[in-house]
Image (cartoon, rainbow, N blue to C red):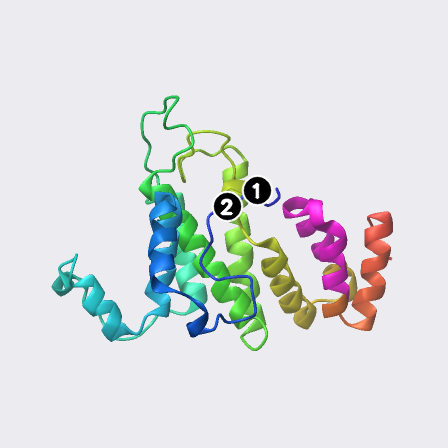
Amino acid sequence: MSNVATKQPTKPGSTSTRKPVASAIDRDKVRTALRRLGDESVFYMLDEAIDILPLAKLAKLASRYLDVKQLRPDAPGKKSLLAEVRAFDGASRAGKYYESFNVDSKSFMDKSTGTRAFIADCRRLLDRCVNQAPKGDGAEIREAIEIILGLLRYIDECHDDVIFFADEAGSWQVGVDWARVLPALFRCLSRATEPDEYARRVVEVVDEFDKHDRGKQLTAARRLGTVAQRTALRAVARTGTAS
């Protein structure tokens, strides 16, 4: 599975490390550009804005279109990242996001609201994993990423009860940014696995999800591993078996 070759809608969590300068963007030009975007891109952009806007501004904006009384938080406290990922996995496998429609020559490229919601939630959770990987609990972040990889694998095993794709079904349509996600997994693996296990798992996950950029991924894995892990990785990448 690899990233989509054609241009995809900008996803939650930009891959750029540079923050745009506020004065470098024109509001009217943004409005014009937005009106040319497809509904799918606008959906993902709005989903990302939910995390970026301060709560007061989000409430003000939402109140123009929604009943904010129905949007008040439940019991105080926030779920951990791992708990949210487990809930997402459970809801996905239970069909929460599955929403089909009649496919014809005009709609075969469309995505249902449920499919868009799945993609947005999946990307958002993976972005949180990436952001927390450098200093967070490595074991929990690794488990969270592995759960999502398992869910994507489940979709690719032709289980069609998670999300609906009108054409060319497959988790590749989720558009995961493997250049960010897999190195975050490598970082967590490096902290808690023996050299041979590190090397084996790195090669497995790269060959399964991002074989197209295998060289770049293995370079990242070597950079993030210990000396012993780098040695084992070279052996596994070359021969397919740990030394």
Name the quadrant containing residue 224: bottom right
Assign a secondary structure to mark 2.
Answer: loop
Instruction: Between label 2 and label 1, give the one nearer the viewer.
Output: 2
| Above or below, 224 relative to 7 | below
| Above or below, 141 relative to 12 | below
The residue that label 2 is drawn on is 8
Identified at 66% across, 45% down, the residue is 208
Amino acid marked by disc 2: Gln
Identified at 85% across, 64% down, the residue is 231
Residue 131 image position (x, y, % from top left): 52, 70
| Above or below, 208 relative to 145 | above
Name the quadrant containing residue 189: bottom right
Q: Main secondary structure of the magenta part?
A: helix
Can residue 73 be seen in this snapshot? no
Can residue 23 be seen in this snapshot? yes
**Depth order, front residue of 192/188:** 188
Amino acid marked by disc 1: Val
The residue that label 1 is drawn on is 4
**Mark 2 and mark 1 residues within 8 Å of each other at the beta carbon:** yes
Assign a secondary structure to mark 1.
Answer: loop
Q: Is residue 12 left or right of residue 153?
A: left
**Disc 2 crowd, CA 10 A, few/some/many (<14, 14-19, 20+):** few
**Disc 1 crowd, CA 10 A, few/some/many (<14, 14-19, 20+):** few
Query: Which quarter of the rendered picture does the N terminus lie within?
Result: top right
Residue 172 image position (x, y, % from top left): 54, 42
Residue range corresponding to the magenta coloring: 201-222
Residue 12 image position (x, y, % from top left): 44, 58
